[in-house]
Amino acid sequence: MGPTMLLPNPLTNTCLSRDGTRLLAFGGKVAQTWDVPSGMPLAKGVLHDETIRSGVFNAAGKEVATWSGAVVKVWDPVTGREFFGPLKHAFPVNWVEFSPDGSRLVTCGADDGPTKCQAQIWNAATGQPIGPPLKHDDGVLCASFSPDSSRVVTASEDFTAIVWDAVSGTQLTPALKHDNQVWAAAFSPDAKWIVTASFDKTARVWSAETGDPITPPLQHVATLANAKFLADGRRIVTSDGKGNFWKWNLPLDERPVDDLRKLGRLLSGTAVAPSGEVISPQSGSLEALWRQLQTRYPSGFATSNEEVADWHEFEAEESELEQQWFAAAFHLQRLLSMRPGDSSFTERLARAQQHLKSGN
């Protein structure tokens, strides 16, 4: 382990470079970089006119962006020299991200009102804007590059996320719609999917190419602040920004396409076909289709005890958060009957019953 770095006040927030060799510390109106192996400070402190909201390194650790108010500064972490003048915005900036190849950065923000805001892509070497503003009907809370730096996805208070070309600013997909503000959006490692996280208590995975939903809404017991793919691209992690995290598996469906179309017809009550294809008339009743698919895939038409227990656990946690103690007690009793060895359910049930007795 290296020497302990003592950061003088007010440098109370930190960010590491990707390789872990450089540390950005900031607080109040001052930002300072440090060499991690030696524990020695690097650049002389960089000053902002307002309290610094956050900061980030580029992938190579050779550029730093810090932002405060409606201004973003991009500077050298070794010398503290600004590469170009401040990037000024018409609204408070709340997100900055460098592209993976380091050639660009994207900024976005929002205010307290229903102001139509936008994201903007910039040349990371010159500070010149690249393409037009990426416009939304309200504040833009997050913007993320695809792994090859060719696209950007934005997440907005207008209940949508949108995929854009990172050079031309052309919108590439229809809006990815939620029932409340979208706080985060990110590409999968292979850039084929996008995950969004919303204030409507759901996350969802979408096609990055067409904008079609890949999963149903993934229900949570709390409003969500973030969602990311893990490195294998087959799992996502969501969080509420308050220290709670959830992991979701994304198994691929290996069934033949024709069977998936049949399943789509069974679930929707209508024919399903890829965009551009003519939908042919469907023969046979939905009841016959049900029997055919149930015979072929029996596990898909049954519910395991573990799935039932997971549902009761979700409902119990949501009922507790909403202080619906009768419902919480009902689900916790079912959980105890299914998982009798879990003492946490006993404690939670006792708490719910005490609330029922006291009438609050």
Image: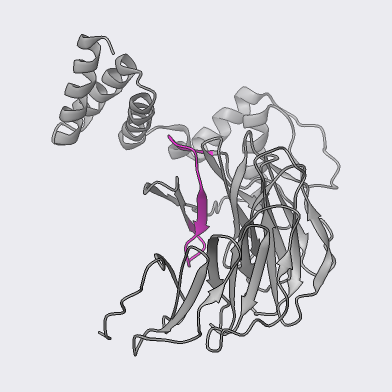
- Name the residue located 31 percent from the left edge and 21 percent from the top edge: 328
Total marks shown come to: 0
Q: Is residue 327 visible?
A: yes
- Name the residue located 50 percent from the left edge and 83 percent from the top edge: 44
Q: Is residue 99 visible?
A: no
Q: Is residue 51 left or right of residue 339?
A: right
Image quarter hosting the C terminus: top left
Q: Position of residue 28 (x, y in %)?
A: 48, 62
- The structure's colour scheme is one colour
Image quarter hosting the N terminus: bottom left
Reply above or below: 86 against 194.
below
Determine the residue located farthest toward the front in the rendered image.
49
Taking depth in this image into account, of 39 and 343 the one nearest to the observer is 39
Q: Is residue 31 left or right of residue 48?
A: left
Reply above or below: 34 against 146.
below
Location of residue 204 by image quarter: top right
Taking depth in this image into account, of 80 and 99 the one nearest to the observer is 80
Residues in magenta, as a range: 218-235
Q: Position of residue 257 (x, y in %)?
A: 66, 49
Location of residue 320 by image quarter: top left
Q: Is residue 219 magenta?
A: yes
Q: Is residue 57 magenta?
A: no
Taking depth in this image into account, of 190 and 90 the one nearest to the observer is 90
Reply above or below: 92 against 264.
below
Location of residue 50 by image quarter: bottom right
Q: Position of residue 10 (x, y in %)?
A: 41, 66
Q: Position of residue 159 (x, y in %)?
A: 67, 39
Q: Main secondary structure of the magenta part?
A: loop
- Name the residue located 70 percent from the left edge and 47 percent from the top edge: 212
